[in-house]
Image (tube, rainbow, N blue to C red):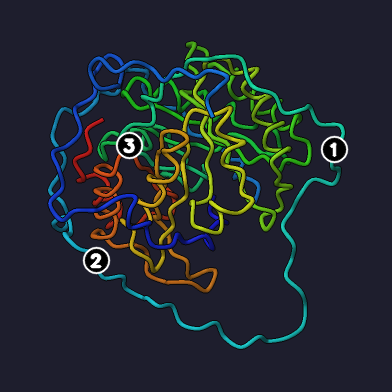
Amino acid sequence: MRRAVGVGAALAVAAAVVLVVTWPSPAPRLSSASGQPPGAPPVARTTAAPTPPPTAAPFTAPTTAAPLPVSEAGPPPLPVPVPTAPPALAGCPPPPPPPASGGGTPTPPWHPDVEVPDSALPAEAAPAPWTAGTAALAGKGMWVWQVGRTEGGDVGAIVRRAVASGLHQIWVRVGDSKDGFYAVATLDALVPAAHRAGVAVIGWGFPYLYDPVGDAVWTLDALRWSAPDGSRLDGYSADIERPSEGVDLSRARVAAYLQTVRQGAGDRLIVATVYPPTNGNWFGSYPYRAMARYVDAFAPMIYWECTDPAADAAEAVARLTTLLPVHLVGQAFSLADVGGRAPAPSAAETEWFLAAAQHGGALGASFWVWQSATPEEWAAVAAYPWAR
């Protein structure tokens, strides 16, 4: 996720989505029982439907087993009025990179030592029909990467902040090809507490696809996990990165991984976290359509840096919803450490992105990443009135 910062989306396709200055009325409030608009059925699918290792510190267990109530209070005031035109982007364009100092070569990204050959992969096949709901993807969310740097690993503080910020879901890293499924202690503490507060938990992982079936094994371990009280993840998202991040990406490998996951997951919610569908990705080799056969939604990474957040959101929704529903992932971090724009997105940018996501047809929108989000970004997320 964080490493995909070089994929800033291009301007939206003008004919696809038109962003208007006066936003339409908010989407209908979701029912408290199902998390979906009243009368909305779950998504039915048929065969024809188209990093560094994590911090090891576990979450701190809650100090009380009492339910954490969902706040009935309305959101706080917006930090600034929702813009009616693209907001100013401080720090853009970023300064040119310094002259090369010479000497040495960049360290290549980690990847597994052994590659299962394509000839040994299962043949791509249509999955059996399944039915999965996408209610957990509605509304606002935030991504967790390094547990110890997220509210100090205190699960009570994490859930309280999620509730205070009006979050509907927390996306928490649960595994990768190097360490397998490693998040049992984290999930044992977090998921029951989040569920008592009415917050969903989506697990996410980083498959390097050198052994797609092996990656599916640890993914299914995460989906089969349950807390002592029987709580389970509300879904799983696979972070499908490019070879620049060490991933052995191809249509065949993505299909082998996701079809094996789907076979074991049944009707569980499966999401593909993907690169934004800019022209180079959408018309190139990035395998959106191979993924769409096996998952229930796309979560494109919209890290806008110096482009218009609303235009990037519109392009992603317009293109990807031709295949599946979309939940957008926005930027809540600075690109200074990779020589990009130094200032993190402002409250105005955050609100502009959320408004474009909500009124452009996205299921919801979340932000990468909890540990880097500024107080200004948190305030904008908390105050934006996206009903879940």
Residue, x 41% and y 44% (percent of image)? 151
| Mark 3 or 1, nearer chain start | 1
Nearest to the observer: residue 21 or residue 380: 21
Label 1: which secondary element:
loop
- The quadrant where residue 181 appears: top right
Residue assigned mark 2: 87
The crowd level at tag 3 (other Cα within 10 Å; few <14, some 14-19, many 20+) is many
Could you give the CA–CA distance between mark 2 and mark 1, rounded to whole angstroms? 48 Å
- The quadrant where residue 118 appears: top right
Q: Amino acid at mark 1?
A: Val
Q: Amino acid at mark 3?
A: Ala
Give the number of marks.
3
Q: Report x, y in % for residue 61.
A: 46, 28
The residue mark sitting in front, 3 or 2, is 2
Residue assigned mark 3: 162
Quadrant where the C terminus lies?
A: top left
Q: Report x, y in % for residue 344.
A: 37, 64
Nearest to the observer: residue 178 or residue 271: 271
Nearest to the observer: residue 327 or residue 17: 17
